[in-house]
Amino acid sequence: MSTELPNIVNWLMKWTIKLLKFGFWTLLVGVIAGAIAAAAAYFYLEPELPDTDSLRDVALQIPLRVYSKEQKLIAEYGEKRRIPLAYNEVPTRMVQAFLAAEDNRFFEHPGVDYQGLLRAALQLLLTGEKRQGGSTITMQVARNFFLSRKKTYTRKLNEILLALKIEQDLSKQEILELYLNKIYLGHRAYGVGAAAQIYYGTGVDRLTLPQVAMIAGLPKAPSSYNPVTNPKRALERRDYVLDRMHQQGFIDRKEYQQSIETPVTARLHAPNIGVEAPYVAEMVRSEMISRYGDQAYTNGFSVVTTIDGRLQQAANSAVRQTLQAYDIRHGYRGAEKQLKIGASADDIQLQRLISGYRTVGDLAPALVTRVEEKSIEVFTTATGHIEIPWKGLEWARPYITVNRRGKKPKQAADIVKPGDLVRVFKESPEKGEPYWRLAQVPAVEGALVSLDPDDGSIVALVGGYDFYSSKFNRAIQAQRQPGSGFKAFIYSAALEAGFTAASLINDAPVVFDDPSLEGAWRPENYSGKFFGPTRLRYALTKSRNLVSIRLLRAMGSEHALKHVARFGFDPDQLPHNLSLALGSATVTPLQMAAGYAILANGGYRVKPYFIRRIEDSHHQPLYQANPPSVCENCPEAGKEEAQAGEPDMQPGHEQPEMKSVAPRAISPQNYYLMNSMMRDVITHGTARKARALGRKDLAGKTGTTNDQKDAWFNGFNRSLVAIVWVGRDSAKPLGRGEVGGRAALPAWMAYMKEALKGVEEIPLKMPPGIITVRINPSTGERAGSGEENAIFEVFRREYAPKARPQSNNTGVGRSGIPGGAAEEDPF
């Protein structure tokens, strides 16, 4: 027994040494084989690996963003919503949350976490399944930028090799920056900047700790853990991230406890639009596509427009109020739809019933829930139950035809019944308390375009009542007859032909047998009356049609067409007959704005444009507008355009290399005389309502076409031009009495009231060559020194009336327009 024990011990020691040797050599061979295999894999895969240096200049897909001139967001276009952030712009808590959730050893490992890989390998040995595991943030960057998401051994090896390579080329901070901007976080959100905006409507610097943890939990499964579509699982994932942050020492116990008790607050947020200008946004989008193709949506372009946010808001409100006022004048067409609501329907059921109906313009959908004698109760998605008083209902006489309404309602039941789907609008009168009013989507459309006359920049543009109901941009696409608004250009041509503001033209019946007009033409004044010999100033003020026609015939159509071309119109697109005098051509509101800008700015031709600057994703300028601008003291400014008739009505393309000076289109004398006469349209003529604005520097011209199919007001002062059009897309009549001074002028007034706040009046300066003469208002001739009822008129010196023998009459001269006579002609 005593000798057996040592023998056993010796035997065990021998076998132990043999096993250790075998294990050593096996391990050594395994290590060598592994090294050889790794080397072989490296040399096999390395030539196919992409160049990681490209990560330094990586171009993330960033949407196109459109801004007002004050840098307020107008629109965003692109499949992926992304707000790139530099590493130092990401809050520390955000970085800690992602490290805790995804890769707590990120700042320690060389791009590959071998502990994580061993765990993944063990999982493979135990289950025989390839599952994602052991991926570091660096490996995710490699996969997201260079590899597919297909789970294969080869892809994993490539991922590892790329991660090691990336860590050699980039700093940890650079890698994290790429990751936090690239990672997909659900609902089109790419990167933490976009996720903060989409889920919480704010920037990353304003997120709370629970919100940060919620976003950090999304990369693992953006759909399954989404706080909007799956809040229960999202809450579990958020609390897991918070627990990891607590374990890692990033937050203390108190912060952890408070955070896990916070409910889910995420909901979807649209881009934070600062200026409502969807028609302008679409113009920009179309222009950018024409310049850059589909890259416009992904290259991160920022487009700064010429739109003034305050003026755009005023334009939106002015058009909508005016179109609603038209609808009120013509009666209530009834509910949009009748919905079935039970007697016991709760707010959730009501909400479900109207959830599919969106707000149109500023008119919210509402469901009538109760009808009292002089009031109704409606339910809206935004405000719940609201009451509409009788003053918000009494306007709703039934619509019968465009010229006829039914009887006034006596009670609310005459107008609506429970279950009616209607529209409501909150009135905010200058005096009195706000109240809700029954409304309806207007049956007519409108447009407003406003320019800075000094350079043609579009400061406000509205193409219709609601862009999302109709994307047709009436400001730039609607070809409509301008009616008497075109007379301004005809009268300017007459002044160049030697006529004066005092020239007499007979306002009398006339018949023309013009083959181009398909037979005899018997034009009339709007009133159907005739007023005999009429001075041009007075005829323009009262918009006398027959005077304009005789004037055009006297000067000749060819002369007029040549002159009108100076205002940017193509003569080939205009009628070559006497109907031109009444605005029978078809033009867009933008073309009218360009023409009227010349009458506003001293006589210079400017070109409308709406893009001021284009920047790349790094905010470096790619394009800077340099439009032809008014420069009265520049030598080039006095030169008239050699080919003024070649129109350029497509804004957004000008990019001259040098400072561009707007050429002169009409003489200073022509400008002064036209401005003077058109001011009388407001002080004495068809736009007298505009005197309520309390300014003396306003000028303009109403316009109405046959059967009141189109209503216009074209107006300006030295600082601003604004054109308003109202009509139906079908070109059907607006109704009796719906002329420019009634249907369109109110929108112009509402807009200019806001737009001209704080803008000083600029006096109309008399240029050289203009003199003032006392004339007889009936004959237009120079008045004698003692002639009664004489008025002052302005003339070009060479066309001023000659002196005549003095009269024995007594009296003093007066300036202005003679009273009496003449029914207003609001064409």
Image (cartoon, helix red, strand yellow):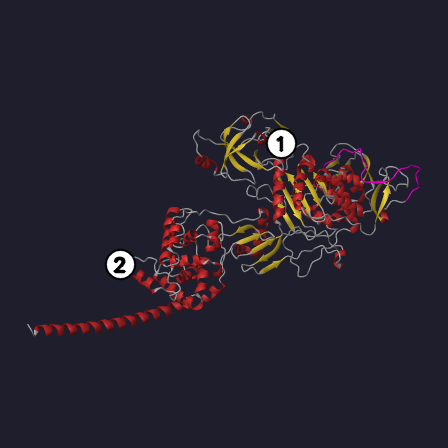
Crowding near the residue tagged with mark 1, few <14, some 14–19, many ≥20 C-alpha atoms within 10 Å: many
Closest to the observer: 825 or 40?
A: 825
Residue 813 highlighted magenta (yes or no): yes
**Region of the chain picked out in magenta, as a range:** 803-827
Q: Mark 1 is on which residue type?
A: His
Q: Is 52 left, or right, of 296 in this rendering?
A: left
Closest to the observer: 632 or 108?
A: 108
> In the figure, 821 relative to 71: above or below?
above
Q: Main secondary structure of the magenta part?
A: loop
Mark 2 to mark 1: distance in Å? 80 Å
Closest to the observer: 627 or 147?
A: 627
Q: Secondary structure at mark 1?
A: helix
Q: Residue 422's spot in the image, x, y percent?
A: 53, 33
Residue at x 83%, y 51% (from the top left corner): 769
Q: Mark 2 is on which residue type?
A: Leu
If the image is split into quadrants, where does the C terminus sit?
Answer: top right
Q: Is 269 left, or right, of 303 in this rendering?
A: left
Q: Which mark is residue 330?
A: 1
Q: Quadrant of residue 700?
A: top right
For the view shown, which residue lies furthest in the left direction?
Answer: 1
Q: Which residue is mark 2?
A: 126
Task: Please say whether residue 77 is visible from this viewpoint.
Answer: yes
Residue 649 highlighted magenta (yes or no): no
Contact (Cβ within 8 Å) of mark 2 with mark 1? no
Closest to the observer: 684 or 235?
A: 235
